[in-house]
Amino acid sequence: MAGFIKFLLASAFLTGLVYAVFFVDFGGKTIYRHVVGITRTDEARTLGTEVENKIGGAAHNVSRKVSTRVAERPGSGGAKAAPLDSHTDRDREALRKLLHEKNK
């Protein structure tokens, strides 16, 4: 019952918030119209362009570093590149023993 009451209160709050954003005037405009007006300024557009450039540059750098690391690995063959971690038979046996002891 308490969960249902919390749901009703949260729904009422969310409904009131949406109503205020789209239908209540603050300074002659709704909050939505204020935000739309702000995003259409030259400063906002410049900021958006700069953010896109930074994100694109960062993504390119990460992509370049990953492809360089994969190419440097011995035995890497493009799509069939070796995993980043290699495990020896000794590692696998130690893991099997550990799991076996844990399941007792």
Image (cartoon, grey):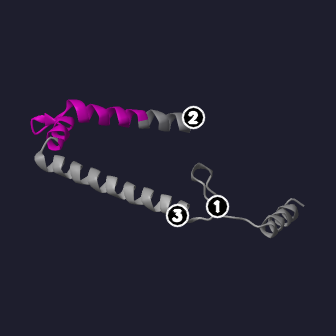
Q: Number of labelled discs?
A: 3
Q: Which-is-in-front pick, marks 3 and 2?
A: 3
Q: Amino acid at mark 2?
A: Met
Task: Report the span colored magenta.
Answer: 11-39
Q: Which residue is pictured at 49% across the width and 58% down the height?
A: 67
**Percent of width and height locating residue 21:** 25, 36
Quadrant housing residue 23: top left
Q: Which residue is pictured at 33% across the width and 54% down the height?
A: 55
Q: Which of marks 2 and 3 precedes in the sequence? A: 2
Looking at the picture, does residue 34 appear above or below residue 96? above
The residue under label 3 is: 69
**Percent of width and height locating residue 38:** 15, 43
**Percent of width and height locating residue 52:** 28, 50
Rounded to the nearest angstrom, the CA distance separating label 3 from label 1 is 12 Å
Q: Amino acid at mark 1?
A: Gly
**Percent of width and height locating residue 7:** 48, 35
Name the disc covering residue 75, or none: 1
Q: Secondary structure at mark 1?
A: loop
Q: Are marks 3 and 2 in contact (CB under 8 Å)?
A: no
Q: Secondary structure at mark 3?
A: helix
Quarter of the image where the N terminus is located: top right
Quadrant housing residue 103: bottom right
In terms of depth relative to the viewer, which is nearer, 36 or 90? 90
Name the disc covering residue 1, or none: 2
Q: Residues within 10 Å of mark 2 (few under 14, many from 20)?
A: few
